[in-house]
Structure formats: C-alpha cells, structure tokens
Amino acid sequence: MIQTFKFPHFRQIYTQASYFSWQNVKFQARRLRTGKTIHQLEDWVNQRNETIDLFTQTEKIAYPILNTYLDKRLKPAHKRFEVMKYDVRKMQLLADGKVFAQLIQGNALLIASLNEDLYFQLGINDLDVNEGLWSLSLRSKENERLYAASFGFLPDNSLLIASLQGPRGDDGKEKVRVLTKEFYGLRPQILTVAVLQMLAKYAKCARIVGIAQAQQVKLRGSLKKRVAMNYDEFWQECGGQLQADGYWLLPAAYERKDEAEIASKKRSMYRKRYEMLDKIEADLQIDLQGETVIASAA
C-alpha cells in the first residue's frame, strides 16, 4: 500500500495535551480557517515520494501552515504555503539531493568538525518548526546542543535566519565564555552565522538575511519571554543593514580585518581564527557532497 500524507491531527502535534484544552479549540479553529490551504498542501506533498517521507516522518513540519512560519508577516496561510514549497524544493536541490535524502530518513549531516569535541550539523529543526524547517547546530561529542540557528529559503533566493538559541541555565554564560576561547575570540553565535553564510554561498543563494526583532515569530503573547536576545542589535553587530523589505541584509561572508588593523599581540589569535573558518568552509563542501551522516539526529 502506497503511503500518503494527511495533515496531522491535534494529538500528533500536541502529544501531551488534552482534547478538552483551550489549545485544541485554537487548533481546530485554525484548521477550519485554513482548510483550503491544507488540502493544497496535502495534494502537493503527495506528488513526490520524498516529500511524503519528509512530512510523514516529521509530522510537526506541516503545522506552520496553521499559524506562523519564519516571519510573522507571512499571512494568510496560502502565503506560508508558497514559501514552504520553495523552502522544501531548495533543500531538495542542495548537493544534488544528497542532503535531502538523509534528512527524510531522520538523519542529520555533519557540516564540519571543529576539533575532537565540537562539530556543526545540519538537520530538521526539532525545537520549533514555526521558526524554520531546518536547523544548523553546534554540538558536543556527547550530542549536547550548544548553539542552534533555524533558517529557511525564501522565494527571492534568500536564506533567512529566523532564530538563534544558545545555552541556558546557570552555566550558560560560562559555556559561551569557554567556547569563545576555543574559537579564538569568536563568539559562538557569530561563528554560527558565519557557517550559515558559507551554507548560503554553497546553496547559491542571492543573499543571506536576518529576521527583524518585530517579525520574530516567538515575539507574541506569552512566548515573548522565551526570546532572550535583541535580533536587531545582533544583526548590526554582524554588519547587517536593514532593508526596505524589513530584513537585515548580512554580509555574504564573515568580514575579516586586514592584518594592519589588528594589534600585534592579537595577530596570532586572528590568524588561527581565520584558519579555522577556512577549514570549516572546506569541510562543509566535502561533507555535504560526501553525505557524512550523523544517524538518528536528536
């Protein structure tokens, strides 16, 4: 029997919630309101086996059609659907389909090993798909997620960074301090953006952009308290420029200083930093083409 995709029901999305909850009332209301787009999504997904595999093995991927997706301004539902179609198609083309073939099996792919203890991986976003279907994460050898960025591809051939999340808890700041030292003075959130700049170049994107603070999907209602950073300030720190379309246009690559601009006592650190970035970019191209898999991504 050929498997087909049907839009998930409430308990497939909210596995612990009660049918009698206010959450279910909102879910059913949104589903009624977006019924036409849901049918269009089902028809589109069921045209290809690989999209069926993607949407059935990760049921929550379809949920953004009901609510928010990448950017709060993407509404009504048919606009989210159009962006989602492009987003998935673009990922299907990455590395001649090799990346997508692993993602639909539930695997993540190694992007680059930084040392024996740290690496970047590319996978399906398992934190909040409203912020993007795809995730780039910095991990420890124990598979601890240290930093994560969610992103998506927009129909104008942009890569949009929709969220960044770092370590939390009492030892969060200490972890960032240790990682910054490990990366030759480069803060892990800046390094994560630098790797996404490399990925955008590899994917032949026309530009890489960051979400504006006002358009970040978690900045609404009770979810606001979960956003611990000011995106507008951060993108400016990355050299971003606010555009007429409301996105922050980021440099195509991490901006490097001329040696003459660097204090002599710091030149060795900067040289090692740039060597690290060069190695990451070289590894990214090799690892994506070689399908270096980290099985059963978590």
Image: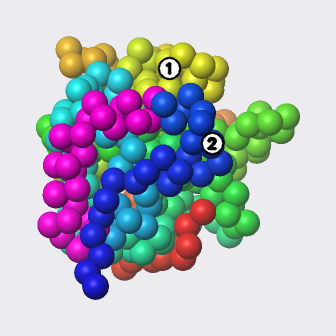
Residue at mark 2 = 18
Q: Nearer the viewer, residue 101 or 254?
A: 101
Q: Position of residue 264 (x, y in %)?
A: 61, 35
Q: Is residue 52 above or below residue 81?
A: below
In this rendering, would 43 be left or right of 296? left
Residue type, mark 2 in image: Ser
Q: Is residue 138 visible?
A: yes
Q: Nearer the viewer, residue 30 or 191?
A: 30
Please tell me which residue is depicted at 50% across the width and 20% down the height of the picture. Answer: 219
Label 2 and label 1: CA atoms lie apart by 25 Å
Q: Is residue 232 above or below residue 184?
A: above
Q: Which residues are magenta?
A: 26-52
Q: Quadrant of residue 267?
A: top right
Q: Position of residue 74 (x, y in %)?
A: 27, 27
Residue at mark 1 = 219
Q: Nearer the viewer, residue 105 or 256?
A: 105
Q: Quadrant of the C terminus?
A: bottom right
Q: Quadrant of residue 95?
A: bottom left
Please tell me which residue is depicted at 60% across the width and 33% down the height of the picture. Answer: 21
Q: Position of residue 212 (x, y in %)?
A: 39, 20
